[in-house]
Amino acid sequence: MKCGKEILYNILPHKEILNLSYHNTLFSQTLSFIPRHVFQKLEHRHKTGRSSRKFGFKEQFTVMAFIQLAARRSMRDALRCLEAAGKRLYHWGLKNVARSTFADANNSRPMDFFKDLFAEMYGLCAATAPKHKFRFKSKLFSLDATIIKLCLSLFPWASFRQAKGGIKMHTLLDHDGYIPAFTTITDAKTHESSVAKTLELPRGSIVVFDKGFISYPWFRTLSEKDVFFVTRLKQNAVYKLLERCPVNRETGVTSDHIIEVISLKKTLRLRRVGYRDPESGKRYEFLTNHFRLSPKTIADIYRER
């Protein structure tokens, strides 16, 4: 063994030998993307009572991130895995965590801390994210919701239907870098449009969604805020044709109409774009309040969704 060390010292410089004793895990590299000053700012904002020097918000987030990425099924299981990590805990900024300490932190600390942490990281990522592929400079978002099924016997609070349980996750995706700009979880019975109406979108941005979000009063609100949308037209939609615009059928666009719908005894002027997919042959009808973009761009925007 002594001979081996002498050979190592002859081959490698002293600095490289020191580096051999330190190795960074993939998990610690992932955690390093969140700057320490972000945690410090949010800890000051959400400070509740006496803070723990050994187990602050950062340590709590690290444990919860480990539970998620390691797919642990319970708090006891997760903390046992952390204890088995041994010396690697140092690189994660952790020490052995008592189950009572972690449980008390989850019970007493505000959930809004993690909501604000999400917003802070979105701001940092959005500043360096690559732009979307379209030529227009407006922000482009996709809005959607999905139901996550749960076992009703294990999660009785998540009652969805008579014999089914579930929750619904609502997500707003920023096409600049394809990063989530907003996400929230509700019970599965909550309609998509009720959450969509609470969003504050940037002026001049374009949001894309499916027919499940159609609400003419909300469309009027978006137009008043200079926010554009692209969606699909329902088959049973009732509207009045105001104008037919010329189209280039070689692009797949079959029609470009200015229409008028009536909601709550108020009229709303919209644009209907017909399109045939050259690959599948399927026909689509899109609905938008954007009158300047070409009809082919409107179709491409929905396809990008």
Image (cartoon, rainbow, N blue to C red):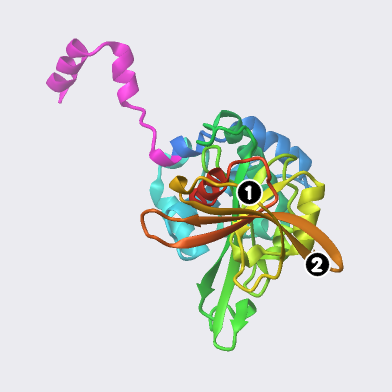
In the rendered view, does 168 fall on the left or right side of 238? left
Residue picked out by circle 1: 245
Of 9 and 195, nearer the camera is 195
Q: Earlier in the sequence, mark 2 or mark 1?
A: 1
Q: Please, what is the three-letter code of the amino acid marked with disc 1? A: Cys
Residue 162 counted in the magenta span: no
Residue picked out by circle 2: 263
Of 264 and 94, nearer the camera is 264
**Residue 196 on image: x %, y %:** 70, 58
Residue 194 visible in the snapshot = yes
Callout 2: helix, strand or loop? Answer: strand
Callout 1: helix, strand or loop? Answer: loop
Q: Quick check: 96 above or below 41? A: below
Neighbor class of circle 1 (other Cα within 10 Å; few <14, some 14-19, many 20+) is few
Looking at the image, which residue sits at the far right?
A: 265
Which residue shows up at 69% across the image and 47% down it? 228
Residue 11 counted in the magenta span: yes
**Residue 276 on image: x %, y %:** 46, 57
Give the extent of the magenta segment: 1-27
Q: Please, what is the three-letter code of the amino acid marked with disc 2? A: Ser
In the rendered view, does 260 fall on the left or right side of 95? right
**Residue 236 on image: x %, y %:** 63, 74
Of 39 and 178, nearer the camera is 178
Q: Are marks 2 and 1 in contact (CB under 8 Å)?
A: no
